[in-house]
Amino acid sequence: MVRRALSLAFWIFLTTSSILLFPVAVVIWALTLPFDGRLFLLHRFTCFWASLYTWTNPAWPVTVEGRERIRDDRAYVIVVNHQSLLDILVLFRLFRHFKWVSKVENFRIPCIGWNMTLNRYIELRRGDRESVIRMLAACEKTIADGSSIMMFPEGTRSVDGRLRPFKAGAFEIAKKTRVPIIPIVLTGTGDALPKRGFVLQGRHPIRLRVLEEIPYERFADKEPQEIMLETRSLFAKELGEPEPNLST
């Protein structure tokens, strides 16, 4: 009962604060749009907004390692393993500039989704080929404009915390735009807030590790599928899981 009560309090806080903070985001957007083409300041405010929910929750102590490996003055394809809804809040703790690639349903969430639209994050409708084509084109334009993109190559959250198969889209974008890939490994979020549940699961330390970038020169002569498998192997190693057979 205590856990359910605390969970309810958290979701009420998230909802109330979002209603209060979205108008602030609109003001920042309107004032900075004429001179801030990348919406850098709006994204920084969004990082602050999202970080409130881990800063104020002692059950979610977050450790961020390697933040300095992501520079705001260059573009990357950033790929992250996906365990929980909480992943998104934790990744904003980077306070680095990027545009999310997110399922279209998230853009319909009042206040939070509207802010995603203001930030020009990139929509994706799962299973819709035309949407995938539009997403790829939007990612290419975003990178050309100097902003990184962030994607979950598994496509959806893991049910049991184990790494799911990767999709090739992020690696096709990196190959075509000739930008480095930055892998980020998240641990602890799946225990703190598992998939198919909204009840917080007690105290669980969360760790976010930014790994060394994979420069374009390292994968320039490889096919996206090969880049995908090699990157997934890197994640598997970091997470202590069996590595996939790269020959298959």
Image: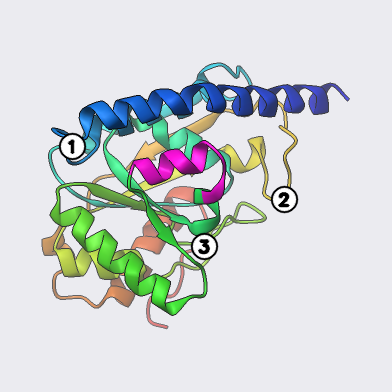
Residue 194 as seen in the image, left or right of residue 139: right
Q: Give the Cα separation between the discs numbered 1 and 2.
A: 35 Å
Q: Which residue is mark 3?
A: 242
Observer-nearest of 114 and 165: 114
Instruction: Indicate the amino acid at tag 2.
Output: Arg
Element class at badge 3: loop
Question: Residue 11, how many percent across, how many down?
Answer: 68, 29
Q: How many marks?
A: 3
Question: Residue 187, how many percent across, how many down?
Answer: 52, 40
Question: Residue 121, how many percent across, how many down?
Answer: 36, 49
User: Is 116 contained in the magenta span?
Assistant: yes
Q: Which residue is mark 2?
A: 196
Q: Give the Cα separation between the discs numbered 1 and 3.
A: 32 Å
The single residue placed furthest to the bottom in the displayed view is: 248
Tell me which secondary structure the magenta stretch mostly adopts. helix
Q: Which residue is mark 1?
A: 71
Residues rendered magenta in the picture? 108-119
